Amino acid sequence: MSAYGLARPLLFALDPERAHELTLQALDGAARTGALRLLAGSPVDDPVEVMGLRLANRVGLAAGLDKQGAHIDALAALGFGFIEVGTVTPKAQPGNPKPRMFRLPQCDALINRMGFNNAGVDAFVANVRRTRWRGVLGLNIGKNASTPIERALDDYVYCLDRVYEHAGYIAVNVSSPNTRNLRQLQEGDALDDLLAGLRARRDELAALHGRRVPLALKIAPDLDGGQVDAIAGLLARHGVDAVIATNTTVTRDAVAGLPGADEAGGLSGAPVRELSNRVIRALRAALPRGFPIVGVGGIMSADDALAKIEAGATVVQLYTGLVYRGPALVRQCARALADRARQWPGRR
């Protein structure tokens, strides 16, 4: 049995949020001694260019696991090809009241209603600046809960300004279900205005810093075909460089009747797999050929990662799968995608 297999029952005996914190602390300690690199093994070498960036392999860490950007070096030792941290907001905020994270082990799922708990963008940038890892780092930005939705652009631009020079790419989170009204920003004129404002400011920052940092938009799995088509059109119109599909779902059809299923928040893990794949397929049909799609949601095995690619994703990200399968999942997925890429040279 793996080290994680031995530790998992102990972790699952704890409150999920406390287990999360202890796991990150343990990873930090193992990374400092070099033990983590020995346990994780050599990362899969499968470089691929996405958004004009050279990723070490096709498996990334999804935002949400390291909200503060405080554990990047340890997480990098697990063999990710790229890492995304956040979501960060302009001002520190505590998030929603605890308890706010719940396991549904019967179906390899989590429900969270964290609410963008973070120490604010200045503390976040300070953490990012301390990291020694030099791989592709995505910084995920959002709005404060106290900011009216009609002023959301102000928060996103504020964060964009402060993270810009430290980011490999910047992810714009408009799809968390745990900030009131946030998902309204995925709709029609609201998204058009948000992306127009971000593009204009990104162009100014690119001129200022002499470097164009890619923008990616993270969307929900609970979108219908018309909404996906509309978003695809806006991505192309505003020069967004990638789309991350998807965030957590507010639906409960796949977990109805299970203990904890009625908790409010976003559902992640195996039950969101096909919802995410459906959105990825719709995006691939609607977007220009080759437009990057980052596939995330319900990856519990190498076969699940391959299914994301077959649906139309370019690369994938993990989060909840790590909770249930452990760090070995990173290499398993990266190896499977590398092997598949050799069979489909046109997809490299």
Image: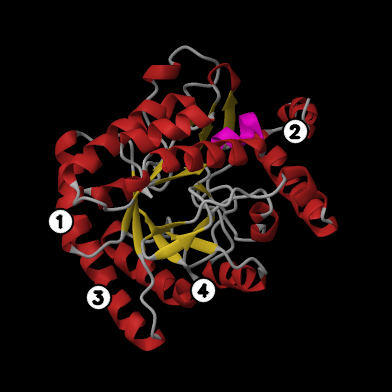
Mark 1 or mark 4, earlier in chain: 4
Which residue lies under the disc numbered 3? 200
Please name which of the two marks, 2 or 1, marks the residue nearer to the observer: 2
CA distance separating discs 3 and 2: 46 Å
Callout 2 secondary element: helix
Mark 2 or mark 1, earlier in chain: 2
Stretch of the chain drawn in magenta: 319-326
CB-based contact (under 8 Å), mark 2 and mark 1: no
Which residue lies under the disc numbered 1? 189
Residue shown at the point (55%, 35%) measured from the top left = 320
Q: Residue furthest bottom?
A: 208
* Residue 52 place in picture, x, y as percent: 37, 65
Q: Quadrant of residue 177?
A: top left
CA distance separating discs 1 and 4: 30 Å
Mark 3 or mark 1, earlier in chain: 1
Q: Quadrant of residue 196?
A: bottom left
Callout 4 secondary element: helix
Which residue lies under the disc numbered 4? 166
